Image (tube, rainbow, N blue to C red):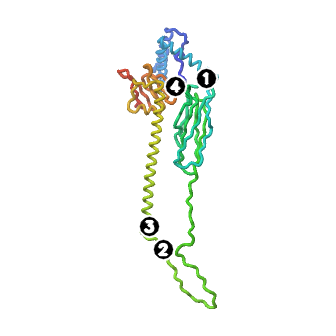
Amino acid sequence: MAKEDYYDILGIEPDATQEAIKEAWKSQLKFFHPDRFQDDEKQRKNAEEKTKEVNEAYAVLSDPQKRAVYDAQRGTQATVLKETVLNPPKPVVSRKTISFKDVEPKEIKTTTFKFDNEGGHYESIWISNPDSWVRVIGYESLTDNDELPMKVTLEVEALEWNQYYEETITVSLDGIETYITVKLQTKPKPVKKTVSTGAEIGSPPSWTPPPSSYTVSVAVPVPKRKIWSKRWVKILITIYAVWCAIALVYWLVEKDTDSQRKQQQIQRYQVELMQKIEERYGKSENVIYEGNSKEELLKQNCLVVSKNDELFLVNAQNPETAMKINCGVYQIGLALLMVEQQPDNHFLVHYPYQ
C-alpha cells in the first residue's frame, strides 16, 4: 500500500508556512488523542496509529532541510506514478506451459524460462514459489542495466508412479500478473512378469488300459507331493526380514538426504539475497541481530539495513524496494520485529520479538 502524503496527513497545502504546520500538528494530535476513545478499543488503536503518522509527518515538515528532500522525492514519485498510469508494465514469459513426461519417482529435472517486461516503468518484481514437487531454485539477470530480462530456473521432482501433477507459477510487475503452468507425468509402475513352467512336478502320469474283453485291476502307485520343510520356511522368513530392514534403512537415508538438500537450497537462497542487499546498501555494521533474527527475517524476505545513519526495511527479493523505519515495533508476517538503539549508536534487532 502506498504511503500517505505528509501534507494530506496534517491537512495542509504544500506551500504552508511553519506556523501553519505547527498549528495543524497540534490540532491533529488533539483530535486523535487516544484518551478520547477509551470506550472503543478498535477506535483507540486506530487513534494511536494516526498519532504516529501525525508525529512522523511533523518531524519531516517542521525541519526545513528534511522538508526540501521530501518535496523533491514527492515530485519524483508523482512523475513516476503518472508514467505508470499512462504506460503500465506488461510482464511476459518465454514459456506459458512447461511439460515433463515419462519421469520416474525420485527423479529430479530442471528447466528455465525467461521473464521480461514489454510495458512501461515498474517498481517491484514478484515470482511465486510453490516449493512442493516444483520449486524455483534460481534467478539470473540477463543484462547489466536492469533486473529484467531475467532467467528463472525451476526444479521438479516426481513422487509416485503413474501420477499427473500440475502447478501454476505466478509472475508479476507492480501487481500485474501473468502465469506459467508446469505439468509432470510419471511412468506407469513396472509389472512383474510370471513364467509358466508347465506341468506340476510330482503329478502322476496318465495311463489308459489296453482294450480287452476282460477288465484287469492294476494298482499304480501315486507319488506324494513334496512338502516344504520347516527349515526352508525359516530361511524365507529370515530373507524377508533382512529385506524389510534394508528397505527401512534406505528410506530413512533418503529422507535425511532430501531434508539436507532442501536446507542447503534455503541457505544458498539466503546467501544470494544477502549478497544482493550488501551490493546496494553495504554491510550495515552498526546493525546487530540478536540470536538467529537475521535468518528468521530472511525467511520472510526482509532485512533491516542502515545507510547514512538511517534504518530501512528492505524487501530481500527486490533490494530496490525499501521502507524507511525508526526504532520501535513492527508487524512482519505473523510475528513482531523490534528495533532499538544502543548507547554505542548501534541498532539491535529482535525477531521474532516476544
Q: Are marks 3 and 4 in contact (CB under 8 Å)?
A: no
User: How many angstroms separate mark 2 from mark 1 (CA)?
Assistant: 88 Å
Which residue position holds label 3?
Answer: 233
At x 61%, y 23%, the residue is 84
Kindly state the secondary structure of the residue where label 3 is placed. helix
Whether residue 217 is situated above or below residue 249 in the rendered picture: below
Q: Are marks 2 and 1 in contact (CB under 8 Å)?
A: no
User: Is residue 40 something one can see in this rendering?
Assistant: no
User: How many angstroms separate mark 3 from mark 4 (CA)?
Assistant: 71 Å
Whether residue 292 is situated above or below residue 30 in the rendered picture: below
Which residue position holds label 4?
Answer: 320
Please state the horizontal and vertical placement of residue 65, each as a whole percent of the image. Answer: 48, 12
Please state the horizontal and vertical placement of residue 314, each as a whole percent of the image. Answer: 48, 26
Kindly state the secondary structure of the residue where label 1 is placed. helix
User: How many angstroms separate mark 3 from mark 1 (CA)?
Assistant: 79 Å
Which label is found at residue 253? none
Which residue position holds label 2?
Answer: 226
Which residue position holds label 1?
Answer: 84
Mark 2 or mark 1: whose residue is earlier in sequence: 1
